Amino acid sequence: MSSNQEGTAVHVHRDDLGAKIGMWLFLFTEVLLFGGMFLVYAFYRIQHADHFRVAAMELDTGIGTLNTIILLTSSLTVALAIAAIQKGNRFFSVLMINLTLIFAVMFMVNKYFEWSAKISHGIYPGSNVMLELPNGQILFFGLYYVMTGLHALHVVIGVVILGVMLIQLMKKKITQDNHVKLENAGLYWHLVDLIWIFLFPLFYLIQ
Amino acid sequence: MANGKDTVAENFYNQSTNKHTGILSWLLTVDHKRIGLMYLYAILTFFVVGVIIGLLMRLELIAPGRQLMDAQTYNALFTLHGVIMIFLFIIPGLPAIFGNFFLPIQLGARDVAFPRLNLLSFYVYLAGAFLALLSLFLPGGPIDTGWTFYIPYSVRSTTNVSLAIFAAFVLGFSSILTGINFVTTVHRLRAPGMTFFKMPLFIWATYATAWIQIIATPVIGITILLVMVERAFGVGIFDPALGGDPILFQHMFWIYSHPAVYIMILPAMGVVSEIIPTFVRRTIFGYKAIAISSLAIAFVGYLVWAHHMFTSGMSDTARWIFSLLTFIVALPSGVKVFNWVATMYKGSIDPKPPFLWVMNFIFLFSIGGLTGLVLGSLATDIHLHDTYFVVAHFHYVMFGGTGTIFFAALHYWFPKMFGKMYNDRLARIAVVLFFVGFNLLYFPKFILGYMGMPRRYYDYLPQFEPLQFVSTVGSWILAGTIFFIIGYLIHALLKGKKATSNPWGGVTLEWHIPSPPPLENFKEIPTVTHEPYDFSQLKEMKDE
């Protein structure tokens, strides 16, 4: 059994297009995951249109708009980070990733204040205040917590991924001609953004 | 390695992809063949566990009244049998084992597109299996909802539902990763000359399966998450007391779980399309029809989910539409069966064990498929819904279909995977025993169901006893056969004759390379010039 070959190098091959196909397929599954939620939302919205409208008044459109602006801007910065590394400007790329991370944290902080305000008003699943509301409103808030919660989870995952990218960028593992990882991380971040773009009107704007 | 003899033995068993030797060279490998084999060992283990649980259930049902367990244990057992067999055996079975091992080889590639992701999905699979097992032993007790986790009981049950369904979520994630890997592999790593319509049909089937895995699995993912959230926080999405709708759960569940049935059967159909040409020495009849019917099944299969819910109180319009679509999905399956049979016409049939397994499959699967139509039509379904008839139909399609082909694939590719031949006579005996045991076990269930025996019942009326008894005897024969098969295959592994590189006279790419294959499959990536089942190549292959 001594015929071990040189080892790890054997299987390494690089296929940037393949990596991107894989990432797009993965994003597709994410869209379907949230698609299931949007389906549920649509179903109950049709059943309880009036209650949904009343419940939506409770949400703070201002804070929602702020978060939308923050996320959209962070999509811009992540795109700039990719453009920068393509042009070989590592410093600017690192800067932009850092900015993206700061925006992500700002988003989560806003979310935290928004949720804790709701909870201090007694609006959370299973609370006495909630149980006295009509069914449609209970469902609205239930969906609100589940859908924005799942989205927030994706923001956290995105932060972890971008953090790893940042380290690789600084260690020069992501370079001008090998940056498909960063591009894929950027795609993931755009997806997180995209889903918010749908969540925002469904919960905050239709009032 | 001085003399020429030893260099022949260079194969993936003694070539590691990492710096380790021994067990770590397996656990950390990124070689698709080793990963496929690790899947084989894990899946086979869970399969045996599922078989044993099935045996216990049959034993309990041998006579009315309590035999060896109480009703709650029985509820846990049929749930576990379903969860293990579906999520741990049938869904990953063919794609993860044989897809992993043979998809890259048949494409003329050195590995899958993402080898490390491939290893990750194996460990995600193991983690899911571990969670499922863990849920048995934690306080609360094993899940007792049935594998469909229907609301509202799955929210009310005090057993470890959350952990068990989270296990299903994790297993689904593994399935998605494998699907992504295979789709990308097919698009990016085909050998030069391997156009889409020169791909072997097993690849077509695996490709269609991979797409269903990608498209359908996220829906069950979110559904399961919602049940967990419902149990933890009581948000009310599925709870009628808070305005939710339990029927919505059924829709969401079947939007995945019906296409999942095609995740289970399509790769099996692909294997059949491999085995038949090899043993009749003829190119497959209607290659394009079979290839495209795989995609058609994948597509139409997505639109028939509500035929599981004909008695749930849907509108009549919805019911007849879903019934119609269910009949339509039978068409591409029929196309395949007719093409397989037509391939044999005027062929030079060589009934080796893998071919006999396929014959077994065509017979059992046809019964399963046709009884599916009985259930797909509204009037008969009202009578037969939730009876043993459904159980029998499901087992004929899944076990008689996919399960049989699991053994067919194992017998067909065993020489290639392990480099050893098994005993031909024992294998033939096993096919016959399997056929007898299978029909004894499941055919009485059609009759029982027709007589009104409901599924999942712990106890039954005395008039059902004779048939229940026959069924239990069948389970002994069937389980005995399975252990017999595993036994002689292990024996072959240890003491079997060496296999040549092409023991059956197949022409797809895996038969062009040594058995077992070397680490990177091909010395040089081949250029494909022939149609996939062009047997005129056999002559040149002998000179290779």
Image (spheres, rainbow, N blue to C red):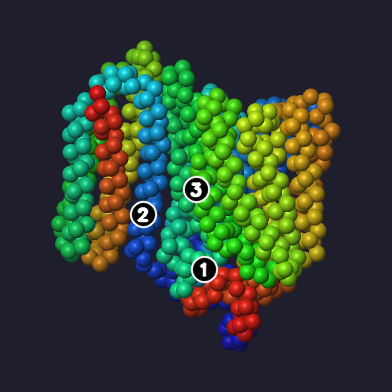
Q: Residue at x 57, y 45 (%)?
A: B329
Q: Please name whichever residue, B35 or B106, is drawn nearer the observer in this view of the structure.
A: B106
Where is mark 1, residue-wise? B198
Where is mark 3, residue-wise? B299
The disc placed on residue A23 is 2
> Tag 2, which chain?
A
Q: Residue B196 location in percent, x, y?
A: 48, 65
Q: How far apart are the two marked residues, 2 and 3, measured between alpha carbons? A: 22 Å
Q: How many numbered marks appear?
A: 3
Q: How far apart are the two marked residues, 1 and 2, measured between alpha carbons? A: 27 Å
Give the amino acid at mark 3.
Phe
- Looking at the figure, which quarter contains the N terminus of chain A? bottom right
Q: Residue at x 49, y 48 (%)?
A: B299
Q: Residue at x 41, y 36 (%)?
A: A36
Name which quarter of the figure residue A177 lies in: bottom left
Q: Is residue B278 above or below residue B337?
A: below
Q: Are marks 2 and 3 in contact (CB under 8 Å)?
A: no
Numbered disc 1: secondary structure: helix
Can residue B502 be seen here? The reply is yes
Q: Residue at x 41, y 71 (%)?
A: A9
Eye-nearest disc, 2 or 3: 3
Give the amino acid at mark 2.
Met
Name which quarter of the figure residue B537 lies in: bottom right
Left or right placement of residue B539 versus residue B481 in this view:
left
